[in-house]
Image (spheres, rainbow, N blue to C red):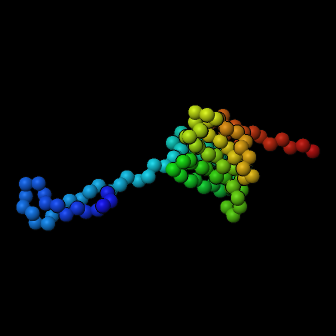
Amino acid sequence: MSEGDIVAEPLRGGPSQGAAQVVPFPAAPKRVSFDRLELQAILNLYGRKVASGEWRDYAIDFMPEKAVFSIYRRSSEMPLYRIEKDPKLAKKQGAYSVIVSSGLILKRGHELDRVLRVLDKPKVVSN
């Protein structure tokens, strides 16, 4: 019997009339997500890049092992960058990382603001 099944047992103290007892439904699986301040920092950077015309779309994925914010130039392409939060790496290299589409990790660290600086650098234009 699973947790969401109805059990046909008599109620306490009452006559056995075939009354059903409801067993609580199982909780939703745990997922890693960005908290409000993390998402605010990411969306502030994203808004600046959209205003400058560099980025156009994004996607957010919350999985059991990590949370991913993907950044696209066009929605039909592979993501340019992925900002990942992996709590399993928090004590080692840092929970946050910025990864380019080829899989290369640009920056990894314990503080999201410092990790995001790698994407916020102004581009140098030479003639």
Decide which of 82, 52 is in the foreground and name it: 82
Q: What residue do we see at 60% from left, 49% from top?
A: 68
95 lies left or right of 9: right
Q: Quadrant of residue 25?
A: bottom left
Residue 78's x, y, as percent?
70, 58
Q: What residue do we see at 68% from left, 44% from top?
A: 98
Vertical arrangement, residue 94 with respect to residue 102, above or below: above
Q: Quadrant of residue 72?
A: bottom right
Residue 107's x, y, as percent?
70, 39
92 lies left or right of 6: right
Q: What residue do we see at 61% from left, 45% from top?
A: 84
95 lies left or right of 103: left
Residue positioned most to the bottom? 18
Residue 59 in sight in this render: yes
Residue 51 in sight in this render: no
Decide which of 79, 94 is in the foreground and name it: 94
Vertical arrangement, residue 47 with respect to residue 18, above or below: above
Residue 4's x, y, as percent?
31, 60
Residue positioned most to the right? 127
Vertical arrangement, residue 77 with respect to residue 39, above or below: below
Residue positioned most to the front? 1
For the image shown, how many numbered marks are present on the structure?
0
Decide which of 8, 94 is in the foreground and name it: 8
98 lies left or right of 35: right
- Pick the quarter of the image with the C terminus: top right
Q: Quadrant of residue 12?
A: bottom left
- Pick the quarter of the image with the N terminus: bottom left
Q: What residue do we see at 9% from left, 63% from top?
A: 16
